[in-house]
Image: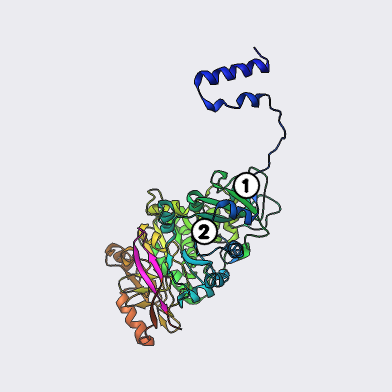
Amino acid sequence: MNSMNERRVLVEQMATKMNKNIFEGVADKLTEPRLQLQKQSEKLTSLEEAIKRCGLKDGMTISFHHHFRGGDKVVNLVVGKLAEMGFKNLHVAASSLQDVHEPLIEHIKNGVVTKISTSGLRGALATEISHGLMDNPVVFRSHGGRGSAVANGDLHIDVAFLGASSCDPLGNACGFSRSENAKSICGSLGYALPDARYADKVVILTDDLVPYPNTPNAISEHDVDYVVEVESVGDSSKIASGAIRDTKNPRDILLARQAAKVIINSGYFKDGFSIQTGSGGASLAAVKYIREEMMSQGIKASFALGGITAHMVKMHEEGLIDRLIDVQSFDRVAAESLKNDPMHKEVSANEYASADEPGSATHYLDIVILSALEVDCHFNVNVLVGSDGIIRGAIGGHPDTAADSALSIIVCPLLRGRIPCIVDEVTTLITPGDTVDVVVTEYGIAVNPKRPEVAERLKAAGLKITTLEALKERALKTIGNPAPLPFGDKVVGVVMNRDGSVMDVIKNIKA
């Protein structure tokens, strides 16, 4: 019984016997002619049409990532289109916001955006918000805290608008491209991955639409609803702008040398150790001196974590670091390495630093070097609000890595200009002191009393150990007591702890 008609009869009999409507239409399809060889993706559309199809309404939450940093073009493009379409009262939940997002000021004034959740703010937008621009306070979360909040529903995202360096028509997207026509590259999309997984709707914006399938991909077509091709999603040359910098500052170099000596003599500098460095000049520069000692002693690291830089890529290629675990590529060299090196692993914010994720990489981190705007006598750290009361930074993974690492080191100058960095009480609490082990300044090293074994090792190595109280007094003798900041009564920011509780608030600064 090989004829098509006989097979059709059998299919109909079987469907009747099994009483299954899943067979409806199957018999017809057996004889249906194939009309076309390739079907066009129904996901591929314009930005305006994608917004309409997502069912976005006033008052909903939209999200963005910041992997293009100062070169990002997606936030302004999308929010500008939403304003043009007449949307109001939107909640912008970006992983971080930069100087380039100054146009949001007008959208806030016009009522298009009324809430913001983020890890950081910079530039004119941060200044305006610090002076009380918004009725609702900005909610600040660490990178790991944001990942947890997105996953557990505390931060529910209605529509995620995610920029990708390349994407195919079905939504397979990543932060690099194998196309000769690649316009932008950002590397890891780690902070976009929770949004792609948990948002109700996901729109990928790309300036490099490539043939299906786009492999390897960071974001799967399974999680993507619409794909929008645009002129540009970001300027790759500005990924390394702002806080990510090589330093030539003599003070930073001195701090870097001291931090490296702390690591080398801490008891954790041994074959197979793991490390993360922050984005400040001194913490990045410390890598140079650690590298020299690793080569001298024949020590290799198991992995480097976090925002990966060209320095880390070089050490990996030299065989000094076995693997790179990348939640954010801090320069183009790191982005290219991610594309080409199978030992360079991309991870989501949850896999990187979520307190709720048992396997998150920070739980297995030995050493982290971080910078600070202020440290107080209880080892509490502020990395978000400047000495003038203006928001000018980001929480990032600071509290996540400090809490989970075996040894957390803060590098901080005694003074910045005429402003003390070692104080009685930080302006804004970001990283609790009980998670900070060592504070390195150019005038001495303070070790948390909870870590006496570390203090003894550093003393035995001949390093100058002091106290934060002594450092604070030295700063005050140099410049005197600074005038108190003119804070108002309006809460302009709320700082969330990793567990979702409120840790601190930020008041408006008077003009």
Main SS class of the magenta portion in the image: strand
| Contact between labelled residues 1 and 2, with CB atoms less than 8 Å apart | no
> What span is in magenta?
493-508
97 lies above or below 39? below
Q: Position of residue 404 (x, y in %)?
A: 36, 57
Residue 186 visible (yes or no) = yes
Numbered circles on residues, count: 2
Give coordinates of residue 232: x percent, y percent: 66, 60
* Few, some or many residues within 10 Å of mark 2 (<14, 14–19, 20+): many
Foreground residue, 332 or 130? 130
Q: Residue at label 1?
A: 43
Please name the residue that numbered disc 2 is placed on.
Answer: 62
Q: Is residue 506 magenta?
A: yes
* Residue drawn at 65 percent across, 48 percent down: 44
Q: CA distance from mark 2 to mark 1?
A: 19 Å
Q: Amino acid at mark 1?
A: Lys
Which of the marked residues, 2 or 1, is nearer the chain's N terminus? 1
Q: Whole-percent x and y of residue 54?
A: 56, 52
- Above or below — where is 94 with respect to 427? above
Q: Position of residue 39 (x, y in %)?
A: 68, 39
* Kind of residue at disc 2: Ile
Nearer-the-camera pick, 357 or 85:
85
The answer to which image quadrant residue 211 occupies is top right
**Quarter of the N terminus within the rendering:** top right
**Magenta residue check for 375:** no
* 300 horizontally vs 56: left or right: left
469 w.r.t. 116: above or below: below
In the visual, does 430 lie left or right of 282?
Answer: left
Q: Is residue 204 visible?
A: no
Q: Name the secondary structure under disc 2.
A: strand
Q: Secondary structure at mark 1?
A: loop
